[in-house]
Each structure stands twice: as structure tokens, then as C-alpha cells.
Amino acid sequence: MKQPTYVTRPFLPPLEELQPYLEQIWANRQLTNSGPFHQEFEQALCEYLGIEHISLFANATLALVVALQALRITGDVITTPYSFVATSHSLLWNGIRPVFVDIDPETLNLDAEKIEAAITPQTTAILPVHVYGRPCDTRRIQSIADIYGLKVIYDAAHAFGVEDEDGSILRDGDVSILSFHATKVFTTFEGGAVVSPDAKTKKRIDYLKNFGFADEVTVVAPGINGKMNEFQAALGLLQLKHVDEALKQRAEIDGYYREALKDIPGIRYLSLPDCSRRNYAYFVIMVEPEYPISRDELYDRFRKDNIFARRYFYPLISNFPMYRAIPSASKSNLPISSASADKVLCLPIYPGLEEAALERTVHVIKGGAKCLTTRNPN
Ligand code: T4K
């Protein structure tokens, strides 16, 4: 039986490198509530990412929920259906109605040109996602937000370390949210963060993630417990030492796929994003009608070969029961999102992925291309 190959595997530094961090935690017994590793990790992340204010969280979903609270977002928020459910769930958890706007077929990000038509007097904010770590059209989105007086909250769960010509894309909008989940390019097992533009916003977010405590006896808001603990922060500090090597290995795999898959009719992959620093978080192919078998048949062939490619993001968020009844969730409003969700397949990409597994992945795709029975015989 072949070894299973997953869409991603966490990058873990040598275990012995963790030992000194654990000894320190055991020695000082500060396990959570903004301990020394927590503070050091915030500082180190600011330096590494080129940002000024960050608040660490137990995960990105809580970070999204709290960020929306901190900015006092209410009413309707424009967002993309082409994302992980946590993006829209964070709106529902705040009693906010998502308004779905279609995506751009080339970038799969929220189509900035379609935002204005969806704005109503109830709209208070835009919640775009830098899908697969590819920057949104941040300038266009900001200009629309400025005209209509809207806040912009970026779900940057996939965008760790990504930079454009202006520097870190985490500086765009009113706040950005990162995920450090086990499946992400940079992980603290579970974890997340809110990047704020100023100290005042960070302070409010820090209160809200700590039950609303401003000091020992003052509670300024009905906050939640969203705190990152010392173990997670220590893992993060250790990971930071290795993240550049991890990103380098991802870039090599990305390059391998681009070369190996370039002439297969019906297999399209996304162009490299136009930015000064990429993170190669996902390698995404689109299985087009010219390819002899369907996306789901290819997905099944992978599984038979013990390769667990994933259909991120299928089904669309707008198709889940809690969103279906929203008028903007209709398929006719979201033709590009709907078509993309039916074509997409994310291939294995992670540091340490063996060459044999890469070759097997490409072999399965090339095998599908040689099928005699085509979907479109005409
Ligand atoms: N916004 C966006 C745009 C997001 O994509 C996400 C999360 C969020 C917000 C919320 O972030 P967090 O609150 O999670 O911090 C995964 C992740 O659970 C989720 O974090 C991620 N996005 C989403 C895209 O994918 P699943 O259900 O696909 O994960 P799972 O368990 O099937 O794992 C996929 C593969 O990864 C496995 O086949 C093997 C490998 N794996 C996974 C885990 C958990 C490992 O090798 N080790 C592991 O520990 O959702």
C-alpha cells in the first residue's frame, strides 16, 4: 500500500528544539494570559511580518468574531461565498447578514467591480478574503470603502508573509485576520491573530479577547475568551526560525507543478500572484470541460491512489443551509463562484513532500488526460 499523501502536512521543527521552551514554561508556570512567550511572539511577528500591532488568538475564527465586534460592525456585510465557512460564520455569530458578491474568474477573490452594485443603506463593511494567499484588489476595495464610508476587514487566514509593492498586505483595510491552524503555512497547532492599524484598535481587541477586562476590576465590554496560550506562543517563536526554509520548499513544489502540468489540455492552474513576496500556501488546478474526466472523477482517482487532494472551496458557503435563503446566495447571483467550486482541486503542497509523491500526483493527472471516453465527445 502506498503511503498516504495529504493536501498539506504541518511543518514541525526538530523536537529537541522545543525542549528549552517547555523548560521555561515549566519553570515560570505562566501558562496563559499574556505571559512572556506571548509578548515575545507578538513582537517577533511584528518584526517578521513588517507590521506594528498584532493581537494573538486561540484561532482565526475567534479573531474574526472579535474583530467585527471591535469595529462595531452591524447590519449587512459584503463578502465572498468562495472561502472556508468560518468567514461567513463570523458574521452570523455577530448577528450580521452576509451579502454575497461573486468572484473574479482569474484570481478567485471577491470581484471588486461587483461590490458597488451590492451596497445598500444597511451595508456597513466589506469582508474580503485573500484566497490561497493571493492579494485582493486592495486599492479598488479601499476606494469603494472610502466613498461609501465602509469598514474593510480582510480575512487573511491564507496570507501569512505575503507582500505587494507597498509591503505587507496585512496593513490593508481596517484590520486583517491571520490563521495559524495546523493546515496553514505557519502553524501554532491552533492559533490566529488580528493585525490592527493603531495601538487604540489593538487595545480594544485585546480587551475583547480577554472577557472585556481593562484591568483587574474593570470590565469594559462583554468580551470572550479568545486568548492564545504560552505553549502556542512558544511553538510560534520556534516556527519563525524555520519559516523561510518552509516557504522556500513550497516555492520549489509550486515550480515543479507549473512545469509538469503546463501542457495538459483541460487542466488550468492559477497564475503566480503579482506580489513581491508569495507564500505558496496552496497549489490550485481547475479541471475544465476539455479534460476527459470530471473534477470529481479525478478526485476519486487520487483517493484510490492514496492521494488526498481537496476541493477547497466546494461546496460554496452560500449553499450551506444557514445561508441558502439569503437572496444574494442564489446561483444566478454567483455564476463564477459556482463554476469555480465545481472545477477546483488543491494538490498536495508542503515542506518535506517527497518527489515520488509529486510524480505520482502528476502521473494521476496525466493518466486522466489519456482517458478514451471523454465528457465532451463533440
Ligand atoms: N478563514 C479562512 C479563509 C480559512 O481558510 C480558515 C480556516 C479560517 C478563516 C478559520 O481559521 P481557524 O479558525 O481554523 O484558525 C481546514 C482547517 O481546519 C481550517 O483551519 C482551514 N481554514 C480550512 C481551509 O481547512 P479541513 O476540515 O479541510 O481540515 P482537515 O482536518 O481535513 O485537514 C486537511 C489535511 O491536512 C488532512 O488531510 C491532513 C492534514 N492535516 C490536518 C491536520 C488538522 C495534518 O497533517 N495534520 C493536522 O493536524 O479544514
Image: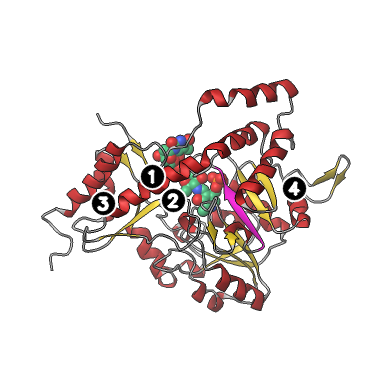
Say what secondary structure mark 1 lies in. loop
Magenta stretch: helix, strand or loop mostly = strand
Measured from the top left, where is residue 311 in percent x and y?
37, 51
- Vertical comparison of 137 with 194: above or below: below
Q: Is mark 3 within 8 Å of ligand 1?
A: no
Q: Which residue is mark 1?
A: 349
Q: Amino acid at mark 3?
A: Ala
Spatial separation of the CA atoms under disc 1 and disc 3 = 14 Å
Q: Amino acid at mark 4?
A: Asp
Judge whether residue 175 is colored magenta: yes
Measured from the top left, where is residue 191 in percent x and y?
59, 41
Q: Are marks 1 and 2 in contact (CB under 8 Å)?
A: yes
- Image quadrant where residue 196 sits: bottom right
Q: Earlier in the sequence, mark 1 or mark 3?
A: 3
User: Which residue occupies the extreme right position in the image?
Assistant: 217
Q: Earlier in the sequence, mark 1 or mark 2?
A: 2
Q: Which residue is mark 4?
A: 206
Q: Which residue is mark 2?
A: 280
- Image quadrant where residue 313 sits: bottom left
Spatial separation of the CA atoms under disc 3 and disc 4 = 47 Å
Q: Which residue is mark 3?
A: 260
Spatial separation of the CA atoms under disc 1 and disc 2 = 8 Å
Q: Is mark 2 within 8 Å of ligand 1?
A: no
Q: Amino acid at mark 1?
A: Ile
Q: Which residues are magenta?
A: 174-180
